Amino acid sequence: MLAQLKAAFKYFNDAVPFKLVPALIATAVLIALLLTPCPTGLEPKAWALVAIFLTTIVAIILKVMPIGVMAMMAIVIVSLSQVTSTSSKGAITDALASFSNPLIWLIVVAILISRGLKKTGLGRRVGLMFIALLGKRTIGIGYGLAICELVLAPFTPSNTARGGGIVHPIMKSIANAFDSDPAKGTQNKVGSYLALVNYHANPITSAMFLTATAPNPLVVNYVAKATGHALQLTWTTWALCMLLPGLVCLLIMPMVIYLLSPPELKSTPNAVDYARSELDKMGKLGASEKVMLGTFALLLLLWANVPAMLLGAAFTLDPTVVAFVGLFVLIITGTIDWDDVLSEKSAWDTLVWFGALVMLAEQLNKTGVVAWFSEGMKAAIVASGMGWIAVAAVLLLVFVLSHYFFASTTAHISAMMLAFLTVGAQLLPPQYVVPFMLMMTAGSGVMMTLTHYATGTSPIIFGSGYVSMGKWWGVGFVMAVVELLVFATVGMVWWKGLGYW
């Protein structure tokens, strides 16, 4: 009998297009939540929405199927169950409402624009140029990789594409040039150090720009809601607030990793020769690369609101409008073509899963779930008798460290951030609410340092074999602590100077 059950399980596991055990776990979570009595203070439909939301998060964490499929599942269930409306038409309208959100389209279009970096070779050229300038020592190569990340971050909202698709191949090429190869057991020559720098630059730059990673617009929405729209993080204000503490983190990160994972080969003069030879092979800057550079300059000027500063408020452009302008410029100049747009799967995948998660978060807020949860958390904290500094620290640390339980930054932010921000806004003295919001904003990027599954970039770099799991987790925890301390000290002073508190 047991053998027949095992055989049947194996058959179904091989036959279905999803992971059977994780699917059964997610289903069990949904059933258990639906059978749980509705908590006091919530409507039954609101509790059903909570069940759908938590099941979706569990399914994403367990990777039952691709995140886009899990997002579509949420749309279908919300529409069929009518938990947000009294009619099927109203439910599907609610389920699809977030797809008109300009911030979602900002991320989608910016991903499409970033395709030009790969197609034209400009991203690789930028990385090689920094290696040629800074690559005489291993730590210099590390700084070259970090600066490459910084330069690309404002224009590549897929941190996975930036760190894993553009910078990581450059890092591997340099490591291989020094015969630092995990297959040969020589990963510690330079590869382990460079892989860690390659990765840890990614969360820092993701925290520095609104357009540096996909869930950042969600953070903008949550901060606005939690503060009653008193704090509106535009592209410019986000970049300005995170500029100095982010640069300090980038400055010290290669040095900290140098101490935690020192490379065996300290001097690397051949790296400069390698980079220069590769640049020679690439030749002079091509026409398409020049168009990319010009487009980036245009985007940066418009996102920074320079025309409005010079000519008046009438020339202010929404960031999503700017992104569409940039995409149109690239298409009409032939830098990318319509087939490139259609084949950029990550952009359309992001549209589906990000839109669905935004929808769930918005509906949880509309149905009063977030307010209910916030009140419960607030009551527990008040009962504990903690001072406001301890409250702020606990909220921040619990939010950041709970990322150990998430394999998706977006899922984590969707599940927890608004409630934490709301509690902070209610319990902290009014003059300290804004710096708390900025610390939480920084924390949404810093938390990606922790594990080898923390975000899409991490499994790519970890999978290359240069860093053991133990070292990855150890360095990740240390870097999370260091970066939080930088934002809590340098950041607070910087925000005070900017007049935010």
Image (cartoon, helix red, strand yellow):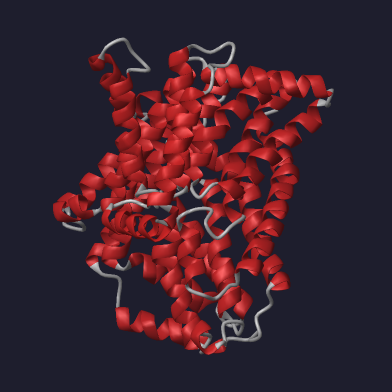
* Residue 472 on image: x %, y %: 62, 65
Is the residue 153 above or below the residue 134 in the image?
above
Q: Nearer the viewer, residue 21 or 424?
A: 21
Q: Residue at x 31, y 39 (%)?
A: 352
Q: Relative to residue 293, is residue 80 depicted above or below?
A: above
Q: Quadrant of residue 267?
A: bottom right
Horizontal and vertical percent for residue 344? 25, 53
Q: Nearer the viewer, residue 338 or 311?
A: 338
Q: As drawn, which residue projects farthest toward the front?
A: 1
| Front in this rendered view, residue 7 or 165 | 7
> Is residue 384 in view?
yes
Give the vertical position of 156 relative to 78 (above or below).
Answer: below
Q: Compare residues 263 and 349 and report the one nearer the observer.
A: 349
Q: Is residue 73 left or right of residue 172?
A: left
| Residue ID at (35%, 41%) | 70
Q: Which image quarter holds the N terminus?
A: bottom left
**Picture coordinates of residue 467, whole percent (x, y):** 58, 72
The C terminus: image quadrant? top right
- Image x and y of residue 231, in percent: 56, 25
From this viewpoint, is residue 499 visible?
A: no
